[in-house]
Amino acid sequence: MTLTLNDYQQLALRTAGNHGDFDRTLIYTALGLNGEAGETAELIKKAFFHGHELDRDKLVKELGDVLWYAAVMADALGLSLAEIAQHNIDKLAARYPQGFSHERSRNREV
């Protein structure tokens, strides 16, 4: 069985708790997302600049935490992860219709 983004989101929400209101939930998830992204970056930094082995298992766990916070924030905004994923793919397709290119990246409309 393959887990869909929306299935994941619903399962993640079982552990989200109640942070009181929209503002508090948005603040909680934004801070958590930033913190987990920082932990992900720290693993990469240590591997490439401090001589550590890249711990893929830890990296997978941190990426999972990033996804969890994104799922909870999306729910607070009344969005599914699938909707957010589709919006992102649409944006990228418009920006890079033939796929990524350095030229399009340097000379793109905002």
Image: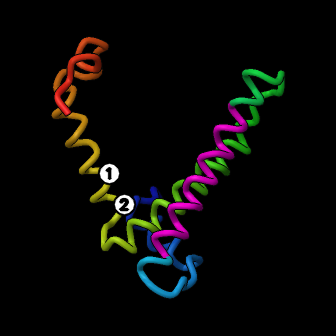
Q: Is residue 30 depicted above or below 89 in this figure?
A: below
In the image, taking residue 21 as reference, residue 103 lies left or right, namely left
Say left or right for 51 vs 70: right
For image coordinates 16% across by 34% down, the residue present is 94
Instruction: Determine which quarter of the picture holds residue 100.
Output: top left
Q: Specify the segment rendered in magenta.
A: 25-44
Going 38% across and 66% down the picture, which residue do you hit?
A: 74
User: Circles 2 and 1: CB distance less than 8 Å?
Assistant: yes
Residue 63 in picture, x, y percent from top left: 59, 48
Mark seen at residue 81: 2
Numbered badge on residue 36 = none
Residue 52 location in percent, x, y? Answer: 83, 27
Query: Which residue is under mark 1?
Result: 85
Residue 30 appears at what percent x and percent y? 50, 61
Q: Is residue 109 above or below residue 37?
A: above
| Mark 2 → mark 1, Cα distance in angstroms | 6 Å
Give, as a three-letter code, the residue at label 2.
Answer: Leu
**Residue found 57% across the figure and 82% down from its top:** 17
Q: Residues within 10 Å of mark 2 (few under 14, many from 20)?
A: many
Magenta-span inclusion, residue 39: yes
